[in-house]
Image (cartoon, helix red, strand yellow):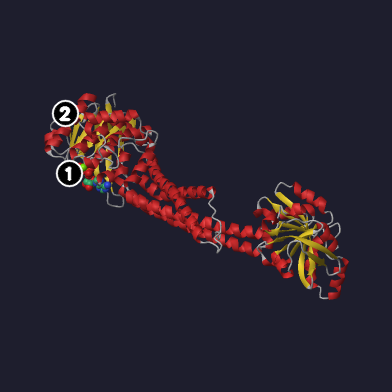
């Protein structure tokens, strides 16, 4: 079923919340395949399960049933240590609320996935992080702590961080949800450019139809089911 | 700012950064450890110093082990039971003092043992010291000067003259000298109950710090004492010192078995003192134990709060490829680092306190009441205990942090 260019494959993925008596099913049998280099938008009304789906794809959350394959590999039986390694290598995250680590500078935040992978910081990591921050237009903000950066700048740092380990897939949960229109446009443009440059696959949750329209593929989720 | 230590592992980097970030929390944890370790160091060096000086004072005039003839022992046990004064008298006539006869050979055997540091023969017994019309009851101490001074450093107790024991020369205590009205060079007649007597010349006057001994001890040669006490060829006891003075009891038992003599260790002679020292140590350990426990609780409660506050960061780290194990290590390290740094500060604080305390507590003559004992070993132990305590105290918060669901942390901003 999966060919060389399939990055993520979901088969009949269900997610239920609650355990004693009252369970609600948030995702009802999702089948989804993401190909390498795709730039897709995930849209849908609030509460339709977009974030849940993204977290499951990102191996942060276990589905109640169903199969998730990352590069053809079934992730259902992997222990935490393996799952963590796979996540670090294959998936970059950009969250709505930036989620940078306040105690670390912009540069160190970008280095974080690399440091976690290598076990310790190296000069090479620093070079790569500086290059990425330069790429997102923050060459002069390397040593700034997150609190000293604007919302748009923080989101750029988060994007640079997601790119740091050069993962084949980047998941972004409403990356522009917190920004004004101009800043949102800038961020979207940046993501699009990275996709063009490096062929990184993107799955972006947004409920801004204006932005969704610019994506090549639009996946619509309503009440836990993919309708388009 | 940019400088990231190249060699620092990521767990360390995160642990140290989290500690630096939570400045107030780290300060309170450090303060707790510092004070706890300070109290422990203070208490330990105080009690060690106190006990050491008490033991030193006690053992200044005592051998660690005294070996005696077994029938001497038996007689001492029987004596109180013998109601007939006649039989007691007969016994005393027959043998004034029971003696160790092959003492030279026994001493050679004892000297061979590695744990024995000095061996000295002693002929001790009662006598009268007479000068003019003053008569005092004294204890004759017949010794081999060279051997005896290796057990009791008499030279350091001399007030006048020197500790020189020979056929004519003897040493007496300050109190006896005063009571008899003698000074250096004066003669004293020693006379025993059965009429034997000898005249000695005072060559030295000592003060061993114990009035009763200053009043009673008269040091003469082994031969003179043997003559006076009718013990020719024998000695009444053999004094022994050992390398580890707290093993005196055990070694004494071994020596007794080897020689067939009885052995009495200083610990048994001073049983009361030992009980006192032991209960003092026990209560000190008890206090230290509770100090450690409360320091540990302090660290745990601060770290539990810190884990809750850091749950967002933990979630982010997990999303970026940080395993549960690593999260656990980051928090364990925080406890360990706090324990180690706090213990170093605490060692300094404790040393300062005890030095200050010792400098204020002085005898009237200005000498410290007890010597301050600050041993490197104690600091090492304190640091190790505090570090381990820190890590153990961090265990519960660390496990909790590792169990955090990254999704919950990421969803709830
Ligand atoms: N941990 C949870 N426990 C119970 N219900 C949850 C939990 N997380 C999400 N939900 C519910 O699942 C549904 C989908 O949530 P979410 O995936 O966040 O939707 P979206 O991102 O599309 O707004 C919502 O009704 C939400 O209340
Ligand atoms: Mg959402």
User: Height in image: A207 above or below B261?
Assistant: above
Chain of the residue on which disc 2 is drawn: A
User: Regarding mark 2 in the picture, which secondary structure is present there?
Assistant: loop
Tally of marks: 2
Pinpoint residue B336: horizontal percent, then vertical percent: 43, 46
Q: How far across and how far down the image is residue A210, in percent?
A: 11, 35
How many neighbours does mark 2 have within 10 angstroms: few (below 14), some (14-19), or many (20 or more)?
Answer: few
On screen, residue B306 versus residue B101, left or right, reads left
Q: x%, y% of residue B316?
A: 29, 41
Q: Residue at x 75, y 52 (%)?
A: B147
Q: Residues within 10 Å of mark 1 (few under 14, many from 20)?
A: few
- Residue B132 placed where, x, y %? 79, 71
Marks 1 and 2 in Cβ contact (< 8 Å): no
The residue nearer to you, when weighing A135 against B323, is A135
The answer to whether tags 1 and 2 share a subunit is: yes
Query: Is residue B152 visible from the viewing direction of this image?
Result: no
Quarter of the figure that contains the N terminus of chain A: top left
Q: Is ligand 1 less than 8 Å from the beta carbon at label 1?
A: yes
Q: Residue at x 39, y 53 (%)?
A: B31
**Badge number at residue A216:** 2
- Find residue B374 and name its label: none
Q: Upstream in the sequence, badge 1 or badge 2?
A: 1
**Picture quadrant of residue A83:** top left
Residue on which disc 1 sits: A46
In percent of the image, x 35 and y 30: which residue is there?
A122
With B149 as the anchor, is A167 left or right in this view? Answer: left
Quadrant in which the C terminus of chain A appears: top left
> Subunit of mark 1?
A
Mark 2 residue's CB less than 8 Å from ligand 1: no
Secondary element under disc 1, as helix, strand or loop, is: loop
Whereabouts is ligand 1, in terms of quadrant? Answer: top left
Near-viewer residue (A16 or A132): A132
């Amino acid at each position: 079923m999966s060919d060389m260019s399939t990055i993520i494959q979901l088969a009949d993925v269900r997610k239920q919340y609650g355990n004693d008596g009252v369970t609600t099913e948030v995702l009802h049998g999702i089948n989804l395949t993401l190909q390498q280099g795709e730039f897709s938008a995930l849209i849908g009304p609030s509460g339709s399960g977009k974030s849940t789906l993204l977290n499951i794809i990102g191996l942060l959350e276990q589905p109640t049933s169903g199969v998730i394959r990352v590069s053809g590999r079934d992730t259902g039986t992997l222990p935490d240590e393996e799952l963590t390694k796979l996540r670090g290598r294959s998936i970059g995250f950009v969250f709505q609320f930036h989620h940078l680590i306040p105690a670390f500078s912009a540069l160190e935040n970008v280095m974080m996935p690399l440091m976690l992978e290598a076990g310790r910081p190296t000069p090479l990591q620093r070079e790569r992080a500086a290059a990425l921050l330069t790429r997102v237009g923050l060459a002069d903000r390397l040593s700034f702590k997150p609190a000293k950066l604007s919302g748009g700048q923080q989101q750029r740092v988060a994007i640079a961080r997601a790119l740091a380990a050069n993962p084949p897939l980047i998941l972004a949960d409403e990356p522009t949800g917190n920004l004004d229109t101009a800043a949102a446009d800038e961020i979207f443009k940046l993501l699009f450019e990275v996709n063009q440059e490096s062929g990184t696959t993107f799955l972006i949750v947004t409920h801004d139809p204006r932005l969704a329209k610019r994506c090549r593929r639009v996946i619509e989720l309503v009440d836990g089911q993919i309708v388009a | 700012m940019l400088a990231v230590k190249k060699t620092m592992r990521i767990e360390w980097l995160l642990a140290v950064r989290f500690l630096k970030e939570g400045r107030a929390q780290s300060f309170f944890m450090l303060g707790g450890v510092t004070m706890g370790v300070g109290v422990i160091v203070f208490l330990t060096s105080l009690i060690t110093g106190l006990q050491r000086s008490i033991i030193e004072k006690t053992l200044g005039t005592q051998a660690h082990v005294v070996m005696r003839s077994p029938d001497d022992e038996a007689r001492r046990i029987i004596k109180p039971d013998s109601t007939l004064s006649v039989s007691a008298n007969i016994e005393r006539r027959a043998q004034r003092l029971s003696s160790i006869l092959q003492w030279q050979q026994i001493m050679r055997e004892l000297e061979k043992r590695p744990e024995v540091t000095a061996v000295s023969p002693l002929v001790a017994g009662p006598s009268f010291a007479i000068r003019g019309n003053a008569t005092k009851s004294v204890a004759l101490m017949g010794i081999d000067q060279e051997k005896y001074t290796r057990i009791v450093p008499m030279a350091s107790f001399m007030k006048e003259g020197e500790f020189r024991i020979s056929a004519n020369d003897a040493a007496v205590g300050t109190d006896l000298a005063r009571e008899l009205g003698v000074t250096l060079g004066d003669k004293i007649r020693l006379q025993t109950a059965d009429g034997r007597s000898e005249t000695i010349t005072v060559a030295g006057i000592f003060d061993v710090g114990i009035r009763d001994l200053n009043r009673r001890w008269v040091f003469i040669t082994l031969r003179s004492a043997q003559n006076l006490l009718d013990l020719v060829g024998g000695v009444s006891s053999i004094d022994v010192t050992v390398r580890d003075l707290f093993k005196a009891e055990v070694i004494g038992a071994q020596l007794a078995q080897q020689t067939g003599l009885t052995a009495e260790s200083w610990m048994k002679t001073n049983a009361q003192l030992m009980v006192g020292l032991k209960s003092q140590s026990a209560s000190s350990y008890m206090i230290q134990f509770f100090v450690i426990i409360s320091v540990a609780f302090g660290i745990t409660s601060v770290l539990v709060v810190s884990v809750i506050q850091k749950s967002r960061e933990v979630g982010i780290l997990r999303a970026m490829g940080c395993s549960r194990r690593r999260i656990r290590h980051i928090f364990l390290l925080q406890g360990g680092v706090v324990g180690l740094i706090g213990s170093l500060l605490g060692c300094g604080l404790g040393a300062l306190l005890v030095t200050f305390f010792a400098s204020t507590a002085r005898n009237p003559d200005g000498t410290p009441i007890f010597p301050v004992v600050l041993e490197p070993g104690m600091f090492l132990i304190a640091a190790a205990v505090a570090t381990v305590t820190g890590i153990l105290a961090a265990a519960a918060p660390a496990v909790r942090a590792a169990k955090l669901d990254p999704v919950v942390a990421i969803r709830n901003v």
